[in-house]
Image: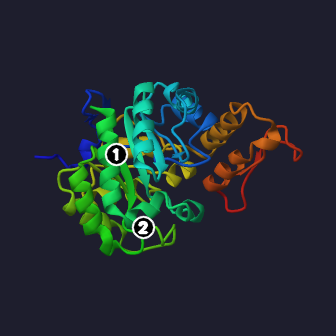
Amino acid sequence: MTDRSLAAWLQPLPLPDGQALPTRLLPGPMEGISEGSFLDVMTSRGLVTAWHTPFLRISTGVPRRSRLTAWLNPYLATGKPVIAQIMGVDSARLAAAAHRLYDIGACVIDLNCACPSPTVIGNQAGGYRLLDPDWIARTLNAMRQACGNAAISVKIRCGFESPDELPGIAAALRRAAPDLVFCHFRTVREMYQPIGDGLERLRRLRDLLPDTPLFGAGDLFTVEDALRMGEVAQVDGVTPARGLIRNPGLLREIAAALGGPAFTPMAREDKVSFLHDLSEQSGLPVKKRGFVIHVARAMGIDYALPGSLDGGGDTKSPNGA
């Protein structure tokens, strides 16, 4: 019988090739954030136990091994297990890319069927694939055939237009039997707009996939958000994304609340120190460190890049954050 207690989130999740994810508390992939110095600072401060890459688009051909290695190496260099996410429309190319990424060192290969970007949807990739659940099943099966014992996963949303699509999507997933399913509780059309029944949607998917490890995503900004998702939706783990920009220590706080190692929530000065390291370790010219300001704003901190024209340092934000 599957242990769906919240305490089980602290336990390793075995993978079919003998590897394991250290816990079921994973960082969600974030395009433009989960890279570079963010990887280094989060890892060096002990704030993550694994990494989930943003998607790599597989379009006109299968990238050479050298290109895939260059893309994956920054994640592998952290010493943490890596979930490599790919996206595309050609099942054979996706399967071939999956094989190469696993051979290079990824421990899980994840198929993105969730991205709601209008550009991605216009190319019939990402969340668009939810309109064809049979394609998802065929592609996951092709990836598994290409990768042997590698763990195969899929990232989805709760439908393209409506959560009423969940039964059909779940039926396809049962046929393909991925090792993990990551699900954001909005539909593709809902993008990131507020919804009121996200946890109930995840619980519905949980009931449709009773034997598949299911990780929930969507509006995970606090420890309470994560615990409530676990209690209501009975997911096997959570993957905060935007919540980690606002609070880089969120995964550690959740783990501590479940009986894991003690962790003191990051105070304002800790966050400023985090931002400073994020900037300095990027190795980029000051004018190209705008992503640090994006993170600072999410934290509610008015932060000036060291060496910038406004004098550097940081000042207290108007809202007192």
Q: Earlier in the sequence, mark 2 or mark 1?
A: 1
Look at the numbered disc 1 and give the secondary structure of its residue.
strand
Look at the numbered disc 2 and give the secondary structure of its residue.
loop
Query: What label does residue 175 carry, if any?
Result: none
Q: Is residue 156 above or below residue 314?
A: below
- Amino acid tagged 1: Ser
Q: Nearer the viewer, residue 193 or 307?
A: 193
What is the x, y in percent for residue 300?
Answer: 64, 56
- The reply to whether discs 2 and 1 touch (Cβ–Cβ < 8 Å) is no
The answer, for residue 24, to whether it is visible in the render is no
For residue 287, what is the image quadrant?
Answer: top right
Q: Is residue 84 above or below residue 202?
A: above
At 40% across and 31% down in the image, what residue appears?
102
Question: What residue sits right under mark 2 in the picture?
Answer: 186
Q: Is residue 233 above or below residue 21?
A: below
What is the x, y in percent for residue 225?
Answer: 39, 59
Query: Is the C terminus in the top left, top right, bottom left or bottom right quadrant?
Result: bottom right
Question: What residue sits right under mark 1 in the picture?
Answer: 153
At 54% across and 36% down in the image, what residue appears?
63
Colouring rule applied to residues: rainbow
Q: Residues within 10 Å of mark 1 (few under 14, many from 20)?
A: many
Residue at the left extreme of this rendering:
1
The answer, for residue 159, to whether it is visible in the render is yes
- Amino acid tagged 2: Arg
Residue at the right extreme of this rendering:
309
What is the x, y in percent for residue 146?
Answer: 33, 35
Q: Residues within 10 Å of mark 2 (few under 14, many from 20)?
A: many
At 48% across and 36% down in the image, what residue appears?
47
In the rendered structure, the answer to whether residue 53 lies left or right of residue 181 reads right
